Amino acid sequence: MCSIPDKSMLPSRFLFCLIAISVFLLIVSSLTLFQFADHSFMPKSVFSLVLVNDTSVYLTSSSGESKDAFLPAETSHEQILKTQELAYETSSFSNDSGGLGIGKSCGPEQALLRVYMYDLPPVFHFGLLGWKGSKDETWPSVSNPSQIPSYPGGLNLQHSIEYWLTLDLLSSNTPNINGPCNAVRVSNSSEADVIFVPFFSSLSYNRHSKVLGKKKISLNRVLQDKLVEFLKGRDEWKQRGGKDHLIIAHHPNSMLDAREKLGSAMFVLADFGRYGAEIANIEKDVVAPYKHMVQTIGADSSPSFSQRDTLVYFQGAIFRKDGGEIRLELYYLLKDEKDVHFTFGSIQAHGVRDAGKGMSLSKFCLNIAGDTPSSNRLFDAIARHCVPVIISDDIELPFEDVLDYSEFCVFVHSSDAVKKGYLLNYLRGMKEDQWTKMWERLKVVSKHFEYQYPSQTNDAVDMIWQAVSRKVSHIQLKDHRNNRFHRSQRS
């Protein structure tokens, strides 16, 4: 206790006691604040950051039910995102090791793209994988990669782009997952550069396009119809006519019933083979690589020119329709050549493993148009460092605005390829140093075609976001040019 000071010591002793009492009261009030945080003036989000560094511990979902099982109920997810953004902005932690990105320090202000993602019910995305969260859960936790719902194997995987992009967006708000700072999810659509529609359309087509039992239409059709209804009713769609919406439709037959109604949106596609030019085109849409089926070969273990005894390799479906008829013509031209492997193949009976081995022991791998201009075979060849020979006149290639495919691929016109002797003479005439230069380039660029979680800098997921950013810039340029006179005329 402070005794009554002598008059001569009053100023200094009184000041000392006043400071001591003030500090004591400050400590008491702080402890009270933390103990009774529910009634304090400090926001819960900030309190949770200070106290436990868990940005969602005090946030619970609304218990309200949606009137329609296929349409999203209102939840507190936007609150969670807001709080997580605050965590990124206020955290001093960063992890730049290995060039994998910035992790927690990557917020909306640092990101190349700010992405708003609709909270569609699980039946549109992870529910199609069999994931069942609790009553109010829209998304699975992505903080532990080993516990994330897996995508079906086999040929389903080659069109799994929807899965990888959605995971990447979810992880952008997950503090312990570090990745490239290209796409960050934001909680307010007005802050977004692009609006992401999380519908697993390729999986929906592959697994749910058949009409079951006594039902009149398939689940795939129901989901597309509900999606169109949902999007057309959103203010975000109405504001720009859907031009800033991103929809994944990588399988050529996905979104068949909805694509025309949603054609103003930006699509992520395998190619434009089954689309009219007014619905999909290179000006507004993004071409994404297939997920390759064969195992990636390491640069150090990639066989060189002299170690590859087979000149030309092709294994796959030979009887195709439309533009794919050229496969049959080439089969009859090449099947009896001694240094050519041209056979029918499938994923059954170790087909993928055998194809990977065959490609890695071949100098050139044929990528021939099938039912559509593109096929997964190109990306299998890249993964095995087998120089691709592209025979598909209408093909569109991923990231071609930044990648020069002529540095690691050979292009042959279809009309030349079917001339007797032309293709083999052309390939046999290529010198070892020419081939080796392409092979060395393949080993460098192959990383751009890898899908993985968490994403890494300049892998397929990261490259897609970069491509989307370039499309967004182009759309903004067109809008600004159109506004040159319209705005002044309105005023």
Image (cartoon, grey):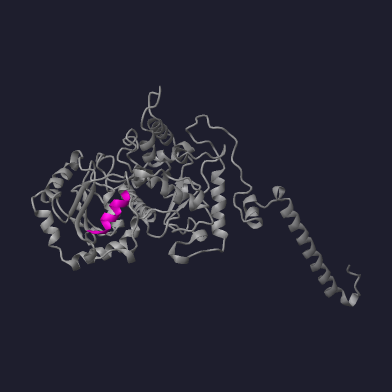
Which one is in front, 193 or 457?
A: 457
Q: Along the horizontal axis of the image, is 45 left or right of 157?
A: right
Q: Residue at x 43, y 65 (%)?
A: 99
Q: Is residue 413 visible?
A: yes
Give the magenta part as a residue range.
352-362
Q: Residue at x 76, y 54 (%)?
A: 32
Above or below, comparing residue 290 to residue 15 in the picture: above
> Which percent across, then down, holds residue 408?
24, 60
> Which percent across, then down, holds residue 414?
14, 48
Residue extending farthest to the top is 214
Quarter occupied by the C terminus: top left
Quarter occupied by the N terminus: bottom right
> Which percent across, then down, holds residue 79?
56, 46
Q: Total label count?
A: 0
Residue extending farthest to the left is 420
> Which percent across, then down, holds residue 209?
36, 32
Residue extending farthest to the bottom is 8
Q: Give the main secondary structure of the magenta stretch.
A: helix
Q: Along the horizontal axis of the image, is 187 left or right of 383?
A: right
Which one is in front, 257 or 205?
A: 205
